């Protein structure tokens, strides 16, 4: 199968955050297989996304006065924001698109929040480094990260007073899926197996032997003195875990409704390869179904996808950190701040009256900011056009030369073909290419990929 | 070429400031008679975000346990606004005190839910979705009300003041409309320039076009309708005051929205609570007083019910930095001209019987929701909340 322009854009937007027109042009006529392999090669390495933090360890925090703790918390909040921005910038600029997109997916799958920047760093490293590796290792790394242990209250899960939160979410959200072949009793028993999973004063994973329940537990029909790793083994051995992951992939990367046949093929491959993530993704991204017309342009870009892909496709870079945070908040998706353990609601939920209006005005705002920054002082009525409100400091670098090279020779229809994944009837646009770019990106169809 | 010449840049900026608004056709519902309130009773929800310290709002000032646990936070008795021999309002809440005196206020104590969660986000989610504490729902209780009750042709669904729509107002098919103010909302809606209906076959694109058309028509409706009444009352000059003024103007102008949602945030008072909380309580109380007067003068108070809640109360014992930490059950206020019960609805929190240092819940907040839905909004609460709750008797 040789891919046409729409299909190539489709792959880039779904398996990454979109690509500039030149990259699309280079890839014309390639097969799904070669497109996928190229992305895998580009995503081999994990470029560090790091924030240097002096945040106190859990042990040190305990020793601090209330006042110092508050100051520490404040510094921590800033560092969490910094990590957020660095990662978002990486998504928008990295060549390792498949890795960043998958890490973003796993962030949703293993939804987690933490006020401790070091914990969050550990969690982010786990999902980025294992994003394309082995799902079992990813699951273990996340489950043992202090951020997740704290978020799901496993610190409170002790032999004398088990806390089931962690065990429940591991089954319900991370592996088997809600109401899929486990009972309330399985959760209680698994919680006993996870007792003692904790982190020490330095914030390193440990198993507190004294708090671990050494008794016999029965989880999913298997009995013994099970510990947390045993439960994870049992969950991975259960094919429902492969099915659940595959279902989530198909609805996230291909279409909201799913596709039973393809889901089964992916699940089979994931299970056969002992949860090799790339093997599973290859089945998805090289399938005929993925490239079918009815799956193109039918996904509402999530806010993060919109912010990152708009920059990649339009040769603009948003450099102002506060603005990047404001955009996430206003559009309704802030990295490291999912609404709850179940992650973000995808699809129509992204759009309400306010977010839709904001989304449709966004490309204009970004270009306007770029223009204002490029003006010379002789442009006398600057004030009149200044951006107002929280985005007044929106700073963007606009690579005008590249944009001109990319777009200026295109006919309106060709430009629309690049910017809009779903067909728009009667494309006419007067004005120069910038007017056209603004015109097309302000259409509802630009919200789709 | 844009960017090359001063004139074309200017042209562009001007254009992008206006972006061809086009002429708006007046939607047909505006041509109908302007003053018919077909909505009936309406609900105004006020959310105090951050976890308001209810024990320092409605204060059992003679309670020994409170006195012992709050050496720095408890107000001097002489200053308090006494409601009874045992109970007083925070001294800054003169406005609320007036409402109490007039029989327009009902205070519910110890409102919460089983297995309470002390995380702001989680607890707020639970209040918004009316879920169990270990259940994750993706729609809000008011959103589900809209799903059931709001006609497709309604000019507006429900209005939330602010940039971001709360989970409470998100339904499956219907969502509330968040707006900062009606003027601004109308102005930005005019910037949308794809007024035609969608003709393609992509269901997601169809959904976006429909949302966009709804925005345009709601904005036009609100803008036109809202011209009918402009308040002459002097609301406190702050964001919350302005938002309540907007809501009053919409209500009195006859905007057919069954629900309004307003938030006031900053109640997370872990340190130096007194000054911070009092500033907020004063903002709340002063604004609500003018709001009530406005509605009363326009004969709109009898079909309005105002509910004020916070995601949790705070620990009984103050902490080491003259503040309080996250707690559990809290008080909740109901206001309106048609209250069946006025004043204190139930006993003050039992501080002898605490749940790890926190107020234990006696009323499930979903009983409050259910009573509002059944007895005030006249819908089957069970269908909105998902299961039955016992009825309270305040409306």
Image (tube, coloured by chain):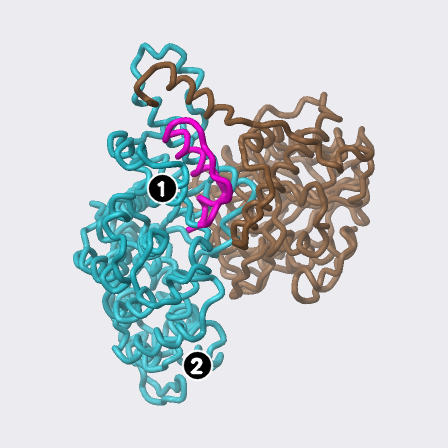
Chain colours: A cyan, B brown
Above or below for A449 versus A229: above
| Residue B124, horizontal then vertical, whole percent | 53, 52
Let me know if residue A104 appears in the view: no
Q: Which of A354 and A263 is in front in this view?
A: A263
- Chain containing mark 2: A
- Chain containing mark 1: A
What segment carries the magenta color? A422-449
Above or below for A38 versus A360: below
Label 1 sits on residue: A310
Provide the secondary structure element on which disc 1 rests: helix
| Residue B25, horizontal then vertical, whole percent | 68, 31
Among the two numbered marks 2 and 1 on one chain, the one whose residue lies closer to the N terminus: 2
Question: Does the magenta-highlighted stretch encompass residue A424?
Answer: yes
| Image quadrant assignment for residue A70 | top left
Classify mark 2: residues with Cα within 10 Å, few (<14), some (14-19) or many (20+). many
Classify mark 1: residues with Cα within 10 Å, few (<14), some (14-19) or many (20+). many
Residue at 57 percent across and 64 percent down: it is B132
Which numbered disc, 2 or 1, marks the residue closer to the eye?
1
Label 2 sits on residue: A186
């Amino acid at each position: 199968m040789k891919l046409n322009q729409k299909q190539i854009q489709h792959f880039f937007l779904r398996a990454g955050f979109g690509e500039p027109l030149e990259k699309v042009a280079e890839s014309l006529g390639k097969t799904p297989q070669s497109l996928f392999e190229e992305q895998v090669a580009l995503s081999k390495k994990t470029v560090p996304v790091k924030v240097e933090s002096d945040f106190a360890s859990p042990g040190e925090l305990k020793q601090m006065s209330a006042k110092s703790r508050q100051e520490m918390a404040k510094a921590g909040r800033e560092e969490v924001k910094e990590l957020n921005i660095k990662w978002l910038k990486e998504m928008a600029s990295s060549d390792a698109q498949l890795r960043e997109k998958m890490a973003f997916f796993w962030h949703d799958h293993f939804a987690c929040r933490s006020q401790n920047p070091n914990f969050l760093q550990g969690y982010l490293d786990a999902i980025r480094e294992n994003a394309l590796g082995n799902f079992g290792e990813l699951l273990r790394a996340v489950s043992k990260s202090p951020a997740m242990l704290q978020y799901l209250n496993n610190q409170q899960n002790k032999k004398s007073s088990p806390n089931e939160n962690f065990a429940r979410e591991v089954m319900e959200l991370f592996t088997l899926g809600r109401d899929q072949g486990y009972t309330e009793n399985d959760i209680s028993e698994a919680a006993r197996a996870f007792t003692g999973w904790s982190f020490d004063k330095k914030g390193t994973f440990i198993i507190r032997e004294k708090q671990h329940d050494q008794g016999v537990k029965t989880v999913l029909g298997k009995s013994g003195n099970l510990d947390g790793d045993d439960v994870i083994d049992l969950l991975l051995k259960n094919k429902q875990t492969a099915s659940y992951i595959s279902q989530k992939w198909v609805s996230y990367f291909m279409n909201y409704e799913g596709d039973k046949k393809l889901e089964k093929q992916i699940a089979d491959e994931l299970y056969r390869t002992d949860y090799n993530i790339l093997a599973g993704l290859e089945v998805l991204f090289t399938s005929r179904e993925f490239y079918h017309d009815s799956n193109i342009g039918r996904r509402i870009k999530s806010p993060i996808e919109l912010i990152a892909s708009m920059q990649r496709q339009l040769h603009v870079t948003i450099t102002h950190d506060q603005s990047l945070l404001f955009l996430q908040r206003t559009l309704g998706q802030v990295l490291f701040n999912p609404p709850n353990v179940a992650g973000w609601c995808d699809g129509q939920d992204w759009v309400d009256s306010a977010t839709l209006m904001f989304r449709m005005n966004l490309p204009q705002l970004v270009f306007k900011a770029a223009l204002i920054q490029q003006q010379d002082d002789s442009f006398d009525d600057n004030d009149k056009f200044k951006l107002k409100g929280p985005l007044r400091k929106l700073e963007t670098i606009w690579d005008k030369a590249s944009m001109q090279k990319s777009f200026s020779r295109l006919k309106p229809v060709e430009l629309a073909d690049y910017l809009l994944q779903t067909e728009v009837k009667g494309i006419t646009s007067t004005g120069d290419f910038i007017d056209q770019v603004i015109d097309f990106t302000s259409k509802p169809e630009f919200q789709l990929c | 070429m844009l960017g090359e010449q001063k004139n074309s840049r200017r042209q562009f900026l001007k254009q992008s400031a206006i972006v061809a608004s086009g002429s708006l056709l007046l939607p047909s519902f505006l041509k109908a008679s302007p003053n018919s309130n077909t909505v009936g009773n309406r609900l105004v929800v006020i959310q105090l975000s951050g976890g308001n310290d209810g024990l320092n709002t409605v204060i059992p000032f003679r309670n020994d346990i409170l006195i012992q646990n709050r050496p720095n936070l408890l107000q001097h008795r002489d200053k308090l606004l006494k409601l009874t021999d045992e109970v007083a309002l925070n001294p800054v809440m003169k406005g609320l005190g007036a409402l109490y005196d007039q029989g327009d206020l009902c205070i519910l104590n110890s409102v919460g839910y089983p297995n309470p969660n002390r995380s702001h986000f989680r607890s707020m989610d639970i209040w918004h979705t009316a879920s169990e504490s270990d259940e994750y729902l993706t729609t809000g209780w008011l959103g589900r009300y809209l799903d059931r009750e709001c006609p497709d042709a309604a000019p507006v669904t429900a209005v939330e003041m602010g940039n971001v729509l709360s989970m409470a107002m998100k339904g499956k098919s219907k969502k509330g409309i968040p707006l900062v103010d009606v003027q601004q909302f109308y102005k930005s809606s005019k910037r949308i320039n794809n007024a035609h209906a969608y003709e393609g076959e992509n269901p997601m694109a169809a959904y976006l076009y429909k949302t966009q058309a709804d925005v345009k028509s709601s904005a036009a409706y609100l803008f036109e309708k809202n011209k009918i009444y402009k308040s002459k009352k002097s609301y406190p000059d702050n964001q919350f005051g302005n938002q309540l003024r907007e809501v009053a103007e919409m209500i009195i102008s006859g905007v057919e929205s069954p629900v309004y949602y307003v938030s006031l945030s900053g109640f997370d008072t872990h340190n130096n609570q007194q000054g911070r909380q009092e500033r907020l309580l004063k903002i709340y109380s002063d604004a609500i007083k003018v709001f009530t007067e406005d509605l009363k003068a326009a004969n709109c108070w009898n079909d309005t019910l105002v509910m004020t809640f916070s995601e949790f109360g705070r620990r009984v014992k103050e902490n080491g930095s003259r503040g309080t930490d996250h707690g559990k059950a809290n008080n909740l206020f109901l206001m309106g001209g048609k209250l069946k019960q006025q004043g204190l609805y139930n006993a003050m929190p039992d501080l002898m019987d605490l749940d790890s240092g926190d107020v234990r819940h006696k009323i499930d907040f979903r009983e409050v929701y259910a009573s509002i839905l059944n007895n005030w909004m006249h819908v089957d609460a069970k269908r909105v909340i998902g299961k039955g709750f016992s009825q309270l008797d305040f409306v």
